[in-house]
Amino acid sequence: NAGVTQTPKFQVLKTGQSMTLQCAQDMNHNSMYWYRQDPGMGLRLIYYSASEGTTDKGEVPNGYNVSRLNKREFSLRLESAAPSQTSVYFCASRLRAEGGYTFGSGTRLTVV
Amino acid sequence: GQQLNQSPQSMFIQEGEDVSMNCTSSSIFNTWLWYKQDPGEGPVLLIALYKAGELTSNGRLTAQFGITRKDSFLNISASIPSDVGIYFCAGHLLARETSGSRLTFGEGTQLTVNP
């Protein structure tokens, strides 16, 4: 089982460029999440999707947009990348409200 | 912002030693979870706790859900080099659970084990 798959694993962008981070899960999970991880700040929620067709803002949504393309896929888009968006991005999914999250292996993004 | 206080921020121990880390909050949590993150990987769930007072073990790991519902601890016994990584606590705040309810994460404890 692949679990949660994120692409790409690494990316370098110039300030102002745009890109989409892809996430797909094969566990038939209902909810999906995007987090960013920065040194000393733990995991901060950017956006989440409780179910197919719905998306909501998390703790740090500014500068990002998301699309829940179908039950399997949840993408994160940076329309105009900024150096402050240099981070490691994790996608996660969950089957039920009481369950833990399954995380992908992350996308390491550097904006120069 | 963060509602979980995780301590210590980092630990340097010798192989074979026991380790203890904890999370506290001013808020009441329904669920406590402990994750481990290896370098270059995403967090992996170690232990999930669903009831106040619950004590759960997973091999050399033991975690407890505090009676007040505001804290949890994780113990690792007889540490080995592969225990190295970042350990995160996480919890669901006491509220009506929906499929969209979100976990709150602590800032992590970086564990280093010297052989």
Image (spheres, grey):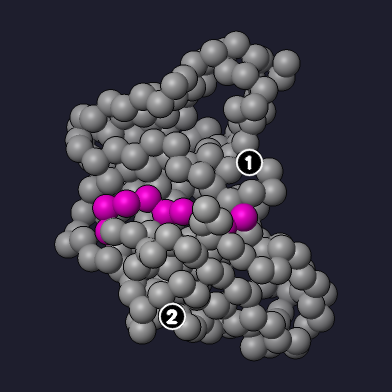
Q: Residue at x 53, y 60 (%)?
A: A4
In the displayed structure image, the side of residue B67 where residue A20 appears, left or right: right
> On screen, A55 above or below A29?
below
Report the residue that reaches farthest toward the front.
Answer: A1
Q: Main secondary structure of the magenta part?
A: loop
Q: Amino acid at mark 2?
A: Asn
> On screen, B99 above or below B29?
below
In the displayed structure image, the side of residue A25 where residue B17 appears, left or right: right
Q: Which residue is mark 1?
A: B38
Q: Is residue A84 magenta?
A: no
Report the residue that reaches farthest toward the left.
Answer: B96
Chain containing mark 1: B
Mark 1 or 2, which is nearer the eye?
2
Local crowd at mark 1 within 10 Å, few (<14), some, or many (≥20)? some
Q: Residue at x 45, y 43 (%)?
A: B45
Q: Is residue A41 visible?
A: no
Q: Nearer the viewer, residue A87 or A97?
A: A97
In the displayed structure image, the side of residue B90 where residue B112 appears, left or right: right
Secondary structure under tag 1 reads loop
Secondary structure under tag 2 reads loop
Residue B57 spot, x, y in % from top left = 36, 24
Q: Is residue B91 visible?
A: yes
Residue B88 spot, x, y in % from top left = 49, 43
Q: Nearer the viewer, residue A63 or B59?
A: B59
Q: Residue at x 64, y 27 (%)?
A: B82
Q: Nearer the viewer, residue A97 or B19?
A: A97
Instruction: Please count the marks in the image.
Output: 2
Task: Specify the segment rendered in magenta.
Answer: A97-105
Chain containing mark 2: A
The quadrant where residue B50 appears? top left
| Mark number, residue A70 | 2
Residue A90 spot, x, y in % from top left = 57, 61
